[in-house]
Amino acid sequence: MDFKTFCIYFFNVHSIPPQQAGDLWWVTALQVLVRVLIGLFAILIPVPLLVWYERRLLGWMQQRQGPNRVGPWGLLQTIADGLKLLFKEDMNPSKVDKTLFILAPMVFLIPALVTAAVIPWGPSRVWGAAAPGVNVGILYILAWASLGVYGIVLAGWASNNKYSLLGGLRSSAQLISYELGMGLAIITVILMTGSLDMQTIVEGQTYNGPLGLAEWNLGKFFPMGLLAMAMYMISMLAETNRAPFDLPEAETELVAGYHTEYTSMKFATFFMGEYANMIVVSAINATLFWGGYKAPIQFLDGPYLGGLLTGAGHPALGAVVAALVPVFWLSIKILIGLYFFIWIRATMPRLRYDMLMKFGWQGLLPVGLVNILLTALALVMYATSGNAGYLIALVAWLIIFGVILVAFAKNKRVQLFTTNSRRDSTVALYSSAQPFRAVAEHSGYGGQTLPPDAKIGGFPVAESEHEADTADAALTKKG
């Protein structure tokens, strides 16, 4: 086989004659291998650039420069950090389960890489354009995304460290909780498009708006699509263990969480897995809600521009533009999603663990269920009565969520009253057990001596240390 024939078969494997398919099986195998390598490098190579992008953005948001010493604009800083990790000593602490300890970082990284296989980067299935055409792409994503938690749990268990174990347990509970919210948001998109195929979902976001504007899923059946997008973006923060949901690696509580015992390239593998997850979930968000590889306006779309160039007598240039412009638009949308990650990290503090779980189970879950029911109602009403039916569903949406907001506000007021009452009781009990001199010298009373029959919070002030201890013991026993 000459080189020209090999290139023809390699770039279009379907052109192999059936009688030669058995002899040229290695061409198909080589093509599959190259595609796998391209997919791996397409996710892993941007990781150092993403780290630099995050550091520069955080520096700008915090009114400082960020990396600016190693290379132009600090571009080589992440490479220097990678070399540092590469040459650090790879330690395995004593009394760890070495098999699971080594396996955990790989189990954490692999789901992010495999999930990226079903993300369409273009409208064509010809070699060179990534349109995988998996008709159960959503199920594929949800199945693989749920496996990432095992890497974190294995790391916490195998490290034989209490901080690592607590970090792993936190992560498992967190990911299971917020996978429900993410799944409910995705179900809303499935109802709107009627398909589990990622490319069909993208193609369903057509240019039906005025002036050729794209009709993305976030604006369909407003505000159902917008609420589904907000739920997904909140859930993807929790699924990737990013601020304000980075409880599994809370430094002030757990040292470094499940990272504590890891060094060198094992730690770098966790690091790459986290940022690869950020890229993948941002790509999924762009595909489901922001039109995927489609431009926001039709005359900027790749196939449209390619068709114009082909009609003008430049078919080769038109084919290149039609293939690369969709990749450009999806990359821009992924960068916007990554900016959202970084912006939230620079803006919001870390939540308490109880607040995290309460928000997932008492916030996202019921809101997601109601949103799915109302989206289905809107679809049925629109199909039977047109825009009038949609308006009826919209009014129902506003009424139900208005009731939910009122109930939530009332519950918050009750909690605030209960908290204030409990705090006042605590102050009173604490004050009743204080020695006379300590209360008299308290700054709140100006350092003046109180009379013998003085009371604080309705409780008499103790006259001595012994009396204070006795009163405190009696109150404790009574409580």
Image (tube, rainbow, N blue to C red):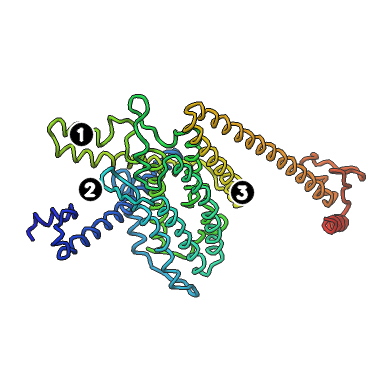
User: Dot 1, crowdedness within 10 Å: few (<14), some or many (≥20)?
Assistant: some
- Residue pointed to by mark 1: 307
Q: Which residue does the image show at 84% across and 43% down from the upper left?
A: 457
- Along the viewing direction, whichever of 350 and 390 lies nearer the viewer: 390
Q: CA distance from mark 3 to mark 2?
A: 47 Å
Q: Residue furthest top?
A: 211
Residue 193 sits in quarter: top left
Q: For the view shown, which residue lies furthest in the bottom direction?
A: 95
Left or right: where does residue 446 sit relative to residue 454? left
Amino acid type indicated by mark 3: Lys
Asked if 35 appears above or below 315 in the picture, the reply is below
| Residue 412 in picture, x, y percent from top left | 68, 40
**Which disc, if any, is residue 126?**
2
Q: Which element is circle 3 on?
A: helix
Specify which label sits upstream in the sequence, 3 or 2.
Answer: 2
Residue placed furthest toward the front: 384
SS category of the residue bearing label 1 = helix
Mark 3 is surrounded, within 10 Å at the Cα level, by few (under 14), some (14 to 19) or many (20 or more) other residues, namely few
Q: Which residue is mark 3?
A: 358
Sequence-first disc among 3 and 1: 1
